[in-house]
Image (tube, rainbow, N blue to C red):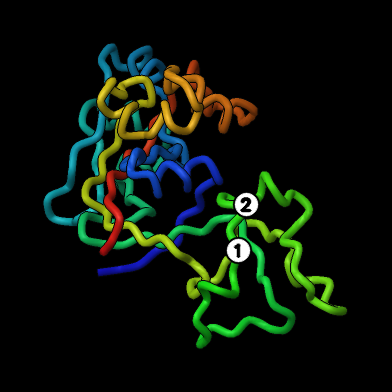
Amino acid sequence: MTERAILFSGPMVRAILAGTKTQTRRVVSPRPPRVEDVHAKAGIDYGWFTDRRTPGRFQVSGPVWAVRELGGSIADTGLSCPYGVVGDRLWVRETFALVWPGEYAPESVHENRVEYHADTGAKYPGGWPNDCGDDPDCGRWKPSIHMPRWASRITLDVTGVRVERLQEISRADADAEGVASILGHPESFATLWNSINGKREGRTWADNPWVWCVEFRRAT
């Protein structure tokens, strides 16, 4: 079993804690060729199949030569999921604050020393309001990318990994993405996706990129 870090925003964290989010989709990088481009060159579509010899690796299903011309070595090397394989674990990085003065103390019990933006950020947008003396870093919200492993409160067991195009998501999978609880009302997954990825080239719902679909459950 391997552990890897994964970043989630506040609304996603709340959905995971509520038990309404058990899937996440992340754009495949480096980006494979578009199905439409391969079809225009070869006259047929292509996809990905699980390489049974190597867990977490996916190989081209379809006109490999066309994918090779458009996507280079990805046609021969395939795709390896950066989020692991079934049985691996993901520990969640989220926006946080250290609520006592001084250095990180990984050996310390962190429950009373870390505050999470997903819980109280709306109430305290400027930072956690405790008395930190002259320590300017204490109580300040830190980006999720800077969260150390010891401060993480959520660990996820990977239960499934696959590659698909974004628009292939089913209604059941959209529910598993926690759409209703994240947006606060019933809405399409496309709206949620674009609110996160809409400003990034080639990543919008309309672009229909290849994505990793990672299924998970809270570790006990």
**Residue 75 drawn above or below residue 121:** above
Which of the labelled discs sits on residue 191, or is there none?
Answer: none
Residue at 74% over, 49% down: 125
Secondary element at tag 2: helix
| Percent coordinates x, y for residue 70 in the rendering | 43, 29
**Residue 194 drawn above or below residue 115:** above
Front-most of residues 112 and 37: 112
| Percent coordinates x, y for residue 33 in the rendering | 41, 29
| Percent coordinates x, y for residue 115 in the rendering | 60, 63
Name the quadrant containing residue 54. Answer: bottom left
Please state which amino acid type lies under the numbered disc 1: Glu
Mark 2 is surrounded, within 10 Å at the Cα level, by few (under 14), some (14 to 19) or many (20 or more) other residues, namely some
**Residue 34 drawn above or below residue 53:** above
Residue at 52% over, 76% down: 110
Residue at 75% over, 58% down: 127
Front-most of residues 168 and 61: 168
Residue at 28% over, 11% down: 43
Extreme-bottom residue of the structure:
107
Query: Is 30 positioned to the left or the right of 134 in the image?
Result: left
Please state which amino acid type lies under the numbered disc 2: Thr
Q: Which residue is mark 2?
A: 120
Extreme-left residue of the structure:
52
Which of marks 1 and 2 precedes in the sequence? 1
**Residue 61 drawn above or below residue 10:** above
Mark 1 is surrounded, within 10 Å at the Cα level, by few (under 14), some (14 to 19) or many (20 or more) other residues, namely many
Name the quadrant containing residue 177. Answer: top left
Q: Which residue is mark 1?
A: 115
Cβ–Cβ below 8 Å for labels 2 and 1?
A: yes
Secondary element at tag 1: strand
Front-most of residues 210 and 124: 124
Q: CA distance from mark 2 to mark 1?
A: 8 Å
Query: Is 45 positioned to the left or the right of 186 in the image?
Result: left
